[in-house]
Amino acid sequence: MKARAKQDAAPVALSREITFAQAINEALAEEMRRDPRVFVIGEDVGEAGTPFKVLSGLIQEFGPERVIDSPISEAGITGLGVGAAMTGMRPVVDIMFGDFLTLTMDQVVNQAAKIHYMSGGKLKVPMVVRTTLGATRRSAAQHSQSLHALFSHVPGLKVALPSTPYDAKGLLKTAVRDDNPVIFFEDKMMYQLKGPVPEEEYTIPFGVADIKRPGTDITIVATSSMVQVALAAAEKLAGERISAEIIDVRTTAPLDKETLIESAKKTGRAMVVDEGYERYGVTAEIASVIADSAFYYLDAPVKRIGAMHVPVPFSPALEDLTVPTPETVVEAAKTLCGRI
Amino acid sequence: MKRSTKPKPKTGAPASATLGPEKLLRFYRQMVKIRLFEEQVNQLYTSAKMPGLAHLYIGQEAVAVGICEALRPDDYITSTHRGHGHCLAKGASADRMFAELLGKASGYCRGKGGSMHIADQDTGNLGANAIVGGSAGIATGAALSAKMRRSEQVSVCFFGEGALGQGLLYESMNMASLWKLPVIYVCENNLYNEYTHYRETTAGEFTTRAEAFGIPSESIDGQDIELVHTAALRLVERARQGKGPAFLTCNTYRFHGHHVGDIDRSYYRSKKEEEEWKNKRDPIELLAGRLVARKLVDTKALKELEEEGRREIEAGVAYALSAPYPDPGEVDQHVYT
């Protein structure tokens, strides 16, 4: 809680607006300038700057030795990242689409996540795996998943998923400085989202949720781009005199339980919105945390909204049905508040 | 399926001229230490004093010792589920290894890793690995790191021929060759992927797999420590000079089963085959025979060396058996730094 107060106390310099993609780029460039051990490895990270152009300019400043264009070998580059991290470097491994994380599973889950523990605390893996999540880009079932729940499930991993340019920059800088493996999810639909980001150096601690909009009637906990969806919903709900408090967890591992519970106790109603699959997902975990500790304060069961339990379809007419929208969030919130 | 496949090693020029008697005696001591360590593990396991799984390295000692003796203390190795030999050969001490195998707090990993995950940062051992081929990326990444840091360290990736079935190895070798990384891939061909002969699982020839990536590839008799060591010296030096990775197949044999509990092996290999290797291809006996034949040492002195090793191993076991288990409070320590 203290940490949040501290990092939020910088409203002076927030006049500058940059995109989410620029925020990521700035965070990496600053960390690479600060620490010669930091390097980037991934497919088309060099001259191409990734297909999303998020890394444009890095190779010009840092050269091909620190911005390494790799073969299309997700398991291999993640494995190399683990080995480099164990021996004094701080790799940032770029996995272009979150769906491709499935190719890295052994290296992330069996190796990176467990090495510190298995070695009795002697070895460490200060590695960041940057990747994407999010549907509605018409990219179909193998380029649209939000698989952050899989990694939030595994002890030894940290998982960050920013919702604004400000958070993206601050959280990524923290991820690079963390001595544990961090899986960093960026919603590819947010890369062009603009927001205030100060010129000055700052970082955002992990495990500190952010109240993106205060409210009194209902708590809406959200992640990544679903925070933007929840904020849009809150605006509509305000028109119906429902005051929604929007909380962005910012990291699912570690999870700032205290902020969620406090808010739910205050409002008496809570829902969780996340773009991962609802079944066995992040929404289930967060709903359970709230129910466990705020049960006697709640006027209704915690409501969960996640992605529909289907592979993401290609057809726009179908794809849009699979993810939470401001409208579905508004409807659910109104129901929870007894307004329907 | 029974087979009596014998390795057909390419034998290089005799290396004895380059290896002095002190070095050969050290090899002998190290190999004997590993043998005695593993015999003790067998004992601990069968007397129910050791929990978990035990994959014995007996029969393959010349590979670990021959390779690791060519490395600097700060060079890296990654190891396998059959990793006690690599760990000892890279310089770990028997007492703390036994402690780890018994799950004791004074073990190398505070009892949290066990037999299949022993790691010892101080001797450059980045860890045994219970995923077959799982350390190919780590070893190659350590080599990338060494190159980026300009430390002139070399990384050795030990794996069995079973790992030739894993894609990660090929992804890693591709990058090692592209970027001329200082990593040696040491394939210990002990003939069996667990309970299946490698010919049933491995198409083509081992050497050509690495050659496809432009990596120099050799196949040698892994029971002949002089050959192994000479090859290692050459390939390690080459890697250290920035000339890139190499692939070394060491043809060897696992005297015991896949793990201690693998008693009835008749369905996958014959007693006759086992006896042939044990009687004619024991790496320790081969070296002992040469040492005596070259009059570098007599059998009495070798016996004394063995007794010396036995005392060290027995002291190590005694230490581990009496060492305390970790405090329950340690269970959730070291999940994160």
Image (cartoon, rainbow, N blue to C red):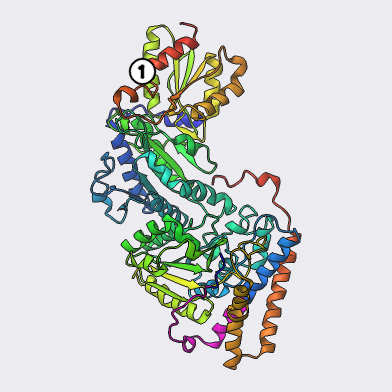
Is residue B185 depicted above or below A216 in this figure? below
- Is B27 contained in the magenta span? yes
Chain for numbered disc 1: A
Helix, strand or loop at mark 1: helix
Q: Is residue B266 visible?
A: yes
Mark 1, other Cα within 10 Å: few <14 / some 14–19 / many ≥20 = some
Which residue in the protein does label 1 denote? A232
Is residue A336 or residue A85 the one in the foreground? A336
The image position of residue A108, as x and y in percent, is 47, 47
User: Residue at the location (62% across, 59% down)?
Assistant: B115
The image position of residue B121, as x and y in percent, is 54, 61
User: Callout 1, which amino acid?
Assistant: Ala
- Is A291 contained in the magenta span? no
User: Residue at the location (43% across, 83% down)?
Assistant: B12
Taking the image as shown, residue B125 lies to the left or right of residue A44, namely right
Check the image and name the residue furthest to the bottom.
B295
Is residue B154 or residue A194 the one in the foreground? B154
Taking the image as shown, residue B252 lies to the left or right of residue B285, namely left
Is residue B295 depicted above or below B174 in this figure? below
Is residue B60 or residue B325 the one in the foreground? B60
The image position of residue A202, as x and y in percent, is 38, 37
The image position of residue A141, as x and y in percent, is 36, 34
Picture quadrant of residue A322 = top left
Q: Is residue A88 visible?
A: no
User: Residue at the location (45% across, 63% down)?
Assistant: B202
Is residue B333 depicted above or below A255 in this figure? below
Is residue A37 depicted above or below A280 in this figure? below
Picture quadrant of residue A102 = top left
| Image: magenta residue range | B5-31
